[in-house]
Image (cartoon, rainbow, N blue to C red):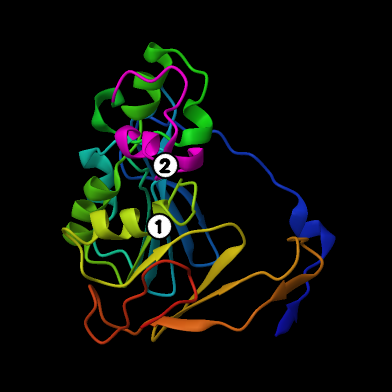
Amino acid sequence: MRQAQAPESTNVAEAHEFDYSRQRQLVYDEDDVRVYSTPVDHYFTEGPVAYRLEWGGMAVVIGGDTAPVMTLAELSEAADVLVLDAMATALDNEKGVAGAEDGAPLEGSDGGGGGRGAAAGAARGTTVRERRNIVTSHTTPAEAGRMFAAAAPRLAIATHNAINGFSLPHIVSEVRKSYVGPLSVAQDLDYWDVCPDRIEAGRLLAAAESWGLIFGDGAALAGGGRGGAGGAAADGRGGAAR
């Protein structure tokens, strides 16, 4: 176990506006750290973007909430870590995969919602139209798996899911239809240390406060190679490496 300290001044954010419609746009460049943005597709609105963070010869891409888009695929090329929206499908949600109790159907169900993902908590009580907007604005685990396979990162991280005994095996199996490299399914308080020769995962043992983070023991998930070469594959919890 270890504790990290940071001054309270690091808890202050300074906003800088940029043109969100430009592809692979450099939006930050200081102290050998570069951040690029590219537009993605979420809820049929203008403004959603994905980010690529580069430093020390490494790159992390954070896709955010989005349907599969080519701009994100291009931004993800040669990424060391790729973080993607990977929601369980609406039909599986109704069976209990993403949080429905005892497999009970969700209120307002239209029998599948178009085949894309919708978290059960977000979909309960919504209209059919609202559910369609939800399920067509995200990426399914199978779609995320294909994007992971194309990018071949040192570590793939699946996000935006209600994690439970139903959903975790389903998410992993859907991603594994296309992608066989190192994989984590993100949960609250997970963290990853990204280094040139290794990537280690762990979980915070206390609520995150900038002046006193408590870390559990990390577990190595991947070595220096890409797409599983020379690294370990992790399925499920961030610290479960094999």
Q: Nearer the viewer, mark 2 or mark 1?
A: 2
In this view, the residue in front, 242 or 215, is 242
Q: Quadrant of the N terminus?
A: bottom right
The residue at 39%/86% (across/down) is 197
Q: Magenta region: which residues?
A: 90-111
Question: Based on the displayed image, in which of its 4 quarters is residue 153 positioned?
Answer: bottom left
Q: Point out residue 173 in the picture as x, y percentages from the top left corner.
A: 26, 59
Q: Amino acid at mark 2?
A: Gly
The residue at 32%/18% (across/down) is 110
In this view, the residue in front, 216 or 76, is 216
- Relative vertical location of residue 48 with respect to residue 76 in this rendering, above or below: above
Q: Is residue 145 left or right of residue 35?
A: left
Q: Quadrant of the C terminus?
A: bottom left
Does the rendering let one see residue 161?
yes
What residue is shown with label 1?
A: 168
Q: Which mark is residue 31?
A: none
Q: Point out residue 235 in the picture as x, y percentages from the top left corner.
A: 36, 70
The residue at 33%/54% (across/down) is 171
Magenta stretch holds residue 82: no
Q: Secondary structure at mark 1?
A: helix
Q: Point out residue 103 in the picture as x, y percentages from the top left corner.
A: 42, 39
- Identify the main secondary structure in magenta: loop
Q: CA distance from mark 2 to mark 1?
A: 11 Å
Q: Is residue 116 left or right of residue 234?
A: left
User: Mark 2 touching mark 1, by CB under 8 A?
Assistant: no
- Relative vertical location of residue 196 with respect to residue 38 in this rendering, above or below: below
What residue is shown with label 2?
A: 96
Q: Residues within 10 Å of mark 2 (few under 14, many from 20)?
A: many
